């Protein structure tokens, strides 16, 4: 039995297999419409979510399976003091696979140690978000045709942004990728990413404070919101929340082939005036999330079609 807790739980070959399966699902939706008939997915979301939870549910339903679970810790026995381990053991009696989001880093890992069924980490605190990473990789593959040899700018909250941390770890295993890290000093990428990923693997990276100075170099810009829920001090959040706003003026030196990505939800860091720009990939990215989660569910359940 295999779980997905961290993006590095999957080898490059396994990631490529999931992405290729997702592409086949996109091309042959009817073929997969009953692949999980009789199977149940439990969505255990101890933290609010829209896209991730609904895309998991849509994925299982489009595979012909069923869904159960909760969308808030307030509606679970966690309010009575039940441990994560006990919740997982119980839900594993009712479901074939579990997608779990939790505000505490490491909670899905803890759950996987006792789970009788595969666990998918749907986000744990500011740590990891591996299915968003798979979504991002599928989007890059569809937008660029390859997962090698491009320059990506990661912009905004690089300190608390679990999507950024997961994506960096995953892309670091591909060839010829340059990372440009765009953030205020207060929201720089954590030191462990610099030392354990970039420097350890001799990966080309650059840290800057404005997107304008590097926009012409970018093949992809990955925008993130400044996350109010990760701040202990509201004054710091208010001071930093509008640091980076991508609009038409910021794109004047950008490549025509640029892809604009965002894990969503967006607050105001991408102007709505860009929504109809063909370079805006973020809603296509959200749709890709459903297909890659379909592929992941099939893979972890060992279902062959």
Image (tube, rainbow, N blue to C red):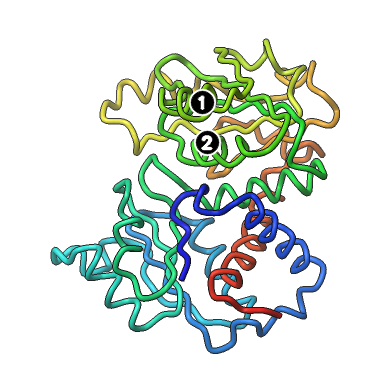
Spot the residue most to the bottom: 38
Q: Is residue 232 above or below residue 26?
A: above
Seen from the viewer's position, the closer of residues 137 and 171 is 171
Q: Picture coordinates of residue 162 (x, y %)?
A: 45, 40
Seen from the viewer's position, the closer of residues 296 and 44 is 296
Q: Tell me: 240 left or right of 37.
A: left
Q: Is residue 200 above or below residue 139?
A: above
Q: Give neighbour class at mark 1: few <14, some 14-19, many 20+ (Cα, 10 Å).
A: few
Instruction: Write the residue at 56% across / 35% down.
Output: 168
Q: Picture coordinates of residue 112 (x, y %)?
A: 35, 63
The label shown at residue 164 is 2
Seen from the viewer's position, the closer of residues 292 and 274 is 292
Q: Give neighbour class at mark 2: few <14, some 14-19, many 20+ (Cα, 10 Å).
A: many
Find residue 209 and report its image quarter: top right
Q: CA distance from mark 1 to mark 2?
A: 18 Å
Please state which of the two labelled residues, at mark 1 or mark 2, is closer to the viewer. 1
The label shown at residue 103 is none
Instruction: Write the residue at 62% across / 21% down.
Output: 180
Find residue 114 and report its image quarter: bottom left
Query: Which element is circle 2 on?
Result: helix
Q: Picture coordinates of residue 203 (x, y %)?
A: 61, 24
Seen from the viewer's position, the closer of residues 303 and 233 is 303
Q: Is residue 248 above or below residue 38?
A: above
Query: Which element is circle 1 on?
Result: loop
Instruction: Write the residue at 45% across / 63% down.
Output: 3
Q: Tell me: 6 left or right of 155.
A: left
Q: Which residue is mark 1?
A: 200
Disc count in the image? 2
The quarter of the picture where the C terminus appears is: bottom right
Q: Earlier in the sequence, mark 1 or mark 2?
A: 2
Instruction: Write the residue at 48% across / 58% down.
Output: 4
Q: Is residue 147 above or below residue 20?
A: above
């Amino acid at each position: 039995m295999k779980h997905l807790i961290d993006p590095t739980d999957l080898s490059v070959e396994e990631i490529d297999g999931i992405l290729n399966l997702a592409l086949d699902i996109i091309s042959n939706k009817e073929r997969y419409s009953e692949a999980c008939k009789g199977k149940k997915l439990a969505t255990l979301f101890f933290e609010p979510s829209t896209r991730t939870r609904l895309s998991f549910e849509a994925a299982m339903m489009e595979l012909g399976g069923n869904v159960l679970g909760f969308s808030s810790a307030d509606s679970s026995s966690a309010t009575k003091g039940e441990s994560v381990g006990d919740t997982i053991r119980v839900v594993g009696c009712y479901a074939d696979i579990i997608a779990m989001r939790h505000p505490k880093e490491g909670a899905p890992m803890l759950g996987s140690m006792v789970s009788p069924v595969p666990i998918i980490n749907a986000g744990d605190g500011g740590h990891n978000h591996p299915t968003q990473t798979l979504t991002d990789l599928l989007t890059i593959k569809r937008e660029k045709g390859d997962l090698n040899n491009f320059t990506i700018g990661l912009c905004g909250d690089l300190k608390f942004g679990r999507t950024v941390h997961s994506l960096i770890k995953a892309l670091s295993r591909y060839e010829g990728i340059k990372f440009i890290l765009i953030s205020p000093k207060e929201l720089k990428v954590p030191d462990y990413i610099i030392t354990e990923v970039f420097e350890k693997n001799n990966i080309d990276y650059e840290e800057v404070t404005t997107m304008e100075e590097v926009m012409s170099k970018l093949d992809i810009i990955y925008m993130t919101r400044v996350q109010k829920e990760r701040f202990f001090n509201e004054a710091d959040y208010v001071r930093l929340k509008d640091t980076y706003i991508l609009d038409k003026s910021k794109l004047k030196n950008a490549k025509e082939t640029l892809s604009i990505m965002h894990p969503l939800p967006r607050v105001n860091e991408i102007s709505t005036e860009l929504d109809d720009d063909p370079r805006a990939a973020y809603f296509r990215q959200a749709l890709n999330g459903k297909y890659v989660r379909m592929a992941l569910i099939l893979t972890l359940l060992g279902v062959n079609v």
